[in-house]
Image (spheres, grey):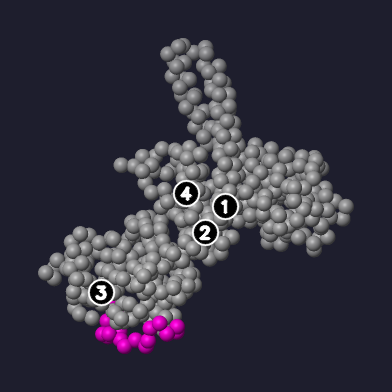
Amino acid sequence: MTRKATISAREFESEAISQLSALLGVASRLTRNNADAQDLVQDTLLKAMRARDQFEAGTNMRAWLLRILTNTFINRYRRGGLERSVLDGPDADPLADGWISASTMESMRDPESQALRPMLEQEIKRALDELPEEFRLAVVLSDVEELSYKEIADIMGCPIGTVMSRLHRGRRLLKGRLYEHARALGIVGPEALVGDISEKQEPVVDLASYREKRVARS
Amino acid sequence: MTSSCRQIVPLLEAFGDEELAPDMLLEVEQHLVDCTTCTERVRLNHALHLSVRSAVRNSAPVMPAFEERIAAALRAEAAREEVVDGVVEREAQHHHMLSWRSVVPVAAAAAATLVWAASTSNQQALARDKSPYTQAENADQLLEELVDHHVNAGGPQVTKPELLSQLEPQVGVPLSLPSLRDYGARWEGGSVVPVSNQHAASLRYMMGGHHVTLYVYNSSRVPIETRLKQRVVRNEEVYVGSRRGVSIAATEHRGVGYAIATDLNDDESAELVAAVY
């Protein structure tokens, strides 16, 4: 059970400063501009301070601040709401999970760091910035802030299934972009497709319904 | 892709995000033992995850000046809260006394009931009036202080535009120098001045024999426009008024307030403030 208890201004300042890195990271990817990102973080923290009696003790302060940051961004910096233009269109899909080989995927990784190869890593920020905002926000909140699907859904004001769909489509666009970059750099060769492109995988948007289908099949 | 992979691939992202239910987790783990392609998919997802995190965190490091700016802004907000709370508390005591005097002649039992009712009513009225009351008070105070600082300006703390950023931690908003050269204004220097329990940057210009002070401050703390008249200049919303023979024109952009204090007329000060960002 949660409870509302106003924290003091001093406690809030201390907590807010400890979350600056997370807030600035998300803000910089939303605004794609450092000066705007700093303004967005400051606006967010002043709003949060004035509304700190609304914070429920025992819940995730970072997630609460990120929700205010996202709303502030939408209201102040993008009065028209998040971009939706790409959501109904086809994804750019030079790479779909089902049809590139294990060796190609392995070539894109750096075995020592377990991350992508450094040359691809440099491309990531650019690729992220080119994602539609809803995909970019979902990817950053999940991969950078490591928030749960539920927390991301609360922040973005959408169902968990929508979060999963945005994550899937955002990551697929990122992988596609990085795959093309890897090909251009000669890190991977022309791909011999495995399987049929038409068999592209659809993301799981509802784990509960998947479980029901699986039970029905068995 | 095998039929088994077809069932598992849609689960791999949730698997990597640690969002799978235990029964499905077991199913995926069993599949990964035998499937090198799906294992590689998981590794690529993980690599992407690590690289995105690294790219985002490295792209926006928190610099000490920014941390100081945020700390200063939060402390200024805390100070404003204390002032507001003090004003409201004094008002509450004032209203409470009036209520008590009005019920003295009433019999003791009834009086107790009436005091309780009046007190509750006054507290509710105060809660309703709290925001506009304090905003108006603060706006009046701020206008007076802006005029004082304009009339009694001291020597500037900085006279080079590149040093203005040193004032940001105290002011709590980003500072850049509007040139105003198109209006024949010459910048003389900048300082930080205390106004209404916060700090504003005071940028002094000389313009054809007239002193012009441009104040830059956090507009969310004190809504100065509540005591000024609205007008539109070149599609910009500005607020204009006069105090003690000094014209004040204010506007706001992205949370930053700009106010001009000058002995020019209201039209000229409105024109100037509309050109500052």
Magenta stretch: includes residue B110: no
Chain of the residue under label 3: B
Quarter of the view holding residue A100: bottom left
SS class, disc 1 = helix
Disc 4 from disc 1: Cα separation: 13 Å
User: Please, is residue B84 above or below residue A37 in the view?
Assistant: above
Stretch of the chain drawn in magenta? A184-201
Task: Say few, some or many: other residues with alpha carbon within 10 Å of mark 2 (under 14 / 14 to 19 / 20 or more).
Answer: some
Callout 1 amino acid? Pro
> Which mark is first along the chain, 2 or 3?
3
Q: Residue A157: percent from the left, percent from the top?
A: 39, 57
Q: Which residue is denoted by mark 1 in the rendering? A: B64
Real-space CA distance between mark 2 and mark 1, rounded to the nearest whole angstrom: 10 Å
Question: Crowding at label 3, few (<14), some or many (≥20) Cα neighbours within 10 Å?
Answer: many
> Which residue lies at the image location 63% right of the left edge and 44% below the top edge?
B222
Q: Sequence order check: which comes first, mark 3 or mark 1?
A: 3
**Residue occupying the point 69% across, 38% down:** B141
Do tag 4 and tag 2 residues touch (Cβ < 8 Å)? no
Badges 2 and 1, same chain: yes
Q: Dot 2 lies on which element?
A: loop
Q: Nearer the viewer, mark 4 or mark 1?
A: 1
Q: Is residue A167 above or below residue B233?
A: below
Give the residue number, with chain letter if any, for mark 2: B61
Q: Nearer the viewer, residue B178 or A209?
A: B178
Residue A18's disc is 4
- Specify whether B38 is left or right of B271: left
Q: CA distance from mark 4 to mark 2?
A: 13 Å
Dot 4 falls on which chain?
Answer: A
Percent x, y for residue A60? 38, 49
